[in-house]
Image (spheres, helix red, strand yellow):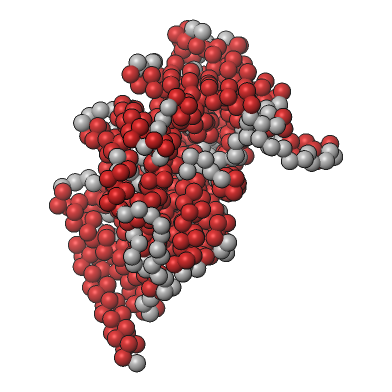
Amino acid sequence: MTELSDREAELVSAHEQERPARQLGGPLKLGVWVVGGLLSAYSLMVVFRPVEAIEHRMTFLAVALPLVFLCYRSGMAPYARRLLRRPEPAPAGEGSRAEWPSAADWALAAASLAVLLYPLLDIDAFRDRGSGAALTDLDIVAGVVLTVLLLEAVRRTVGWAFAIICILFLIYAYYGSYLPIDWTIGHIGFDIGQIVSQLYTGTEGFFGVPMQVAASYIILFTIYGAVLDYSGASKFFIDLSFAAFRKSRAAPGRTVTTAGFLLGTVSGSGVATTVSLGSVAWPVLRRAGYPKEPAGGILAAGGIGAILSPPTLGAAAFIIAEYLGVSYLQVLLYATIPTLLYYLGIFLAIEIDSRRFGTQAVQVDAPRVGRLLLRFGYHFSSLILIVVLMAMNRSAFQSVVIATAVAFLLSFLDPAHRMGPKRIGQALAKGALEVLPVTAVCAAAGIIVGAITLTGLGQNLADIIVDIGAGNLVITTAMAAIAVLLLGLAVPVTASFIIAAVIIGPALFDLGVTRPEAYMFVFYYAVLSEVSPPTALSAVAAAAITGGNTYKTMMMTWRYTLPAFLVPFAFVLTPNGQALLGQGPIGTVLLMTAVSAVAVAALAMATGGLAGLPERLLAAVAAVLLLFLEPVPIVAGLAVLAVAAAMHLIRSRRRRAA
């Protein structure tokens, strides 16, 4: 798992929303890795020797942004060759000059360093000029250059869509005064100096909350994931999953799902987890008798579950903690019950499919569970330690750094993965390089957040959304879900969450939804965009591995992940829904969790294909009623589900008797 094979790397590059990095070689690769390692070391140091917020974020970006231009291709060479009618170059291996940055890349990297170090020469004076709206011409030029550089950085790392969205917000901020005066979204208009002041000189733009999250939380967790990876945790998680489920016909599917959950701790990417897992698990699923499309659905569902599940979750979860002003542990608690329901739904669907497809147990060459846990169970200790330390009121920063140190020390228990100086350097460098695309996205997201704050667009759009929904919470929530899913088709999870949080969040607040419920709703739908047709990146990657039909694989993935699409509606639309986020009396939390679990079971029955059509329709109705989480609908839902179950039992007995 430390290094992906060429085929796996190709699949991740093809289906991940983040673009593939250059294959650097020679002294340049060494230099980039050294700089990346130093960036990680700086991030670790800041945890115990804090630096002023804007200074820290500028310093972090001053190192990360030049690395983006050196590590990521511009992607413009094919267009230039076609324009100039030049032939395609011959394929080049790693470290060849064809993979080296061009003169333009070096110029962009130098410009990035210059415009970010310039304010740091006298940060107090720079900040004073920004707060007093007295920017110099050099300040404005530097701010404009940084804006262009960030747009190019996100274009390289995550594609044109997000860059275009950022440009549209800039155009809106500058030309908003030209909109008709009776339009809700019209405003007085702002000149370049005012826009630059908003984006460049404070913490409302480039160096706002998203950048804080990238420079503080995410980098520390990517370092932690890299240390886990290099210490052998990935191999242990896969071996343990295969050893734990080896006897029943549903075991292969459960194994894949469990392995996806564990591997997500190291990967943090739905597509990467799907691909890494698929290379190992698809042969096992095939031997068990799974058709290509259901196998791909299991792989994709397991992979995307990695982003939805504690203790690491995805990057957007850290932003939720900052937006709400709560600890990261609190966000983990919000996610716990929905995660349990998500995996319950997958396991039930797998159990039904094992019967439907007539799958069989597969003998896998893996050590016994007890032996694995005794020998390598220490890999769990750092994961548990993160939660324990946060429960003891340690900050998330300190908790993950301590857990990283523990994972490093425990690596010496395994001679094959002992982390000497070389592995330490590799882990630090990998942690920094993996955060580059997220850093570019978070910094550029400051354009959107800054423009919305400057113009007041967020509340205006919220008013429009509420008006379109006629003030009805059900309609507005359904519109919000569709909007987030559509947004997620074009931009990565982190970017779609940030945009939706500042635009759709206020609309839900206006209708009485609490901030935790609204942000968690947006979070789940931003993540689920990776398994939503028509793109469904994780499902497409899984289909590429199994060779199955892409569309059918998407639909199977959607079926496996269905609870994750419906449960968020429960905690937004119903008064007792907050119990699914662990909020409220413990009795209510347990009762609502149990009711939701029954609803998930009803969903599995409705989509499973074993029962007849009438029973499945009744089960679907029962699931919807149960998810209202109110006494009368719960009783009605249980009654409808009982009828469906009775009909299924009668039909099954008649079939066996015949």
Q: Residue 136: x, y in percent?
A: 57, 10
- Asked whether 518 or 388 is in front, the reply is 388
Q: Picture quarter containing residue 118? A: top right
- In this view, which residue lies farthest toward the bottom? 658
- Asked whether 591 or 476 is in front, the reply is 591
Residue at (52%, 65%) from the top-left corner?
Answer: 292
Residue 558 at least partly seen = no
Q: Residue 415: x, y in percent?
A: 39, 35
Q: Is 243 left, or right, of 169 in this rendering?
A: left
Check the image and report above or below for 634 versus 83.
below
Residue at (38%, 51%) from the top-left corner?
Answer: 239
Q: Picture quarter containing residue 498? A: top left
Q: Residue 629: x, y in percent?
A: 24, 58
Residue 107 at least partly seen = yes
- Asked whether 20 or 108 is in front, the reply is 20
Check the image and report above or below for 463 versus 117.
below
Residue at (42%, 27%) from the top-left corner?
Answer: 420
